[in-house]
Amino acid sequence: MDFLTAAVGLVVLLFAGDALVRGAVNLSLRLGVPALIVSLTIVAFGTSAPEFLISISAIHEGVPGLALGNIVGSNTANVLLVMGIPALITTLHVVDNSTRASYLQMIAATALFTALAFIGPFGQVSGLILLAALGFMLVHAARAARSHRANAADAAVCAMDEEDVEGADPHMGWPKIIAFLVAGLIGLPIGAELLVNAATHIAQSFGVSDTVIGLTLVALGTSLPELATTVMAALRRQADVAFGNVIGSNMFNLLGIIGVASLVGPIPVAPEIMRFDIWVMIASSLLLGVFVLRRKSITLIWGLTLTALYVLYIVMVF
């Protein structure tokens, strides 16, 4: 029953998160918020809503190890699994230079997160530092995007239309927008509560820590939206979108989710994470640089390698 409850909670989270993104995006565009700002904020925050709600719920339920394990495990899964599986379908080629800049920001975010983890439990000071770093990166991204569009030769081609924003629907009426918002706002906390409670019971019944469940079961589940998006980008031959999805998600996980969660309550850093899991996360992040910085394609062989490395990691965690 615990596994069934966890599955139900995960499904509710995924559908509620998608509903919230669609509702918030279309509400913002109808209110006149620029599409660029919507993409950099609402879409980024909304697609990470499952991880965010799980982290907050885990702290309230007294299992903060699940919150930290979820983030570290999700970032590892995002590189090894989310980039590995699409490469089994088609080769991923890096083209866009902006992907390299975003990757370097992700490495900086990883370094900051790791340094704070070594200092001690994540508290309010750590949370404010992480959120300040996130704010700086969002401002930098917004300025870079505006500069790129201002210097573009054909503004009509380079301008971001509403249709280009994930979840945007120019024909969506107000009743549907409100319905999506309500469904998302109600479904997210319910799904998070179901998944966290079930995951805690599973950890207790198997005699493993909540951190291990967060690193594996919960992290894998909350990485499904990124996996779905990346697979679709691969099928459409949009490798830069796939890379950008993973890089952006990893940055927001480390800076945004842990930053806000640290303000809700202290998050201790489990010794097993510092001994092993955080180094796997760092190694996988650096491995991604081989493809981004050197513009090396992720071929079928690399896809098999990345996926196998993730399976090996899960086996070693248990």
Image: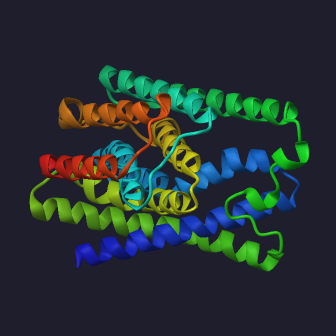
Q: In the rendered view, would you say 198 is above or below 120?
A: below
Query: Residue 3 or 110: which is nearer the viewer?
Result: 110
Query: Residue 70 or 90: which is nearer the viewer?
Result: 90
* Picture quadrant of residue 213: bottom left
Query: Residue 241 or 68: which is nearer the viewer?
Result: 241
Residue 160 place in picture, x, y as percent: 80, 50
23 left or right of 259 in image: right
82 left or right of 132 in image: left
Residue shown at 67%/73% (left/top)?
180
Q: In the rendered view, would you say 57 is above or below 182?
A: above
Q: In the rendered view, would you say 265 is above or below 202?
A: above
Residue shown at 73%/30% (left/top)?
144
Residue shown at 84%/51% (left/top)?
33
Residue 203 place in picture, x, y as percent: 18, 59
Residue 112 place in picture, x, y as percent: 44, 23
* Picture quadrant of residue 122: top left
Q: In the rendered view, would you say 16 is above or below 218?
A: below
Image quadrant containing the N terminus: bottom left
Badge count: 0
Residue shown at 34%/54% (left/top)?
219
Residue ranking furthest to the left: 207
* Picture quadrant of residue 174: bottom right
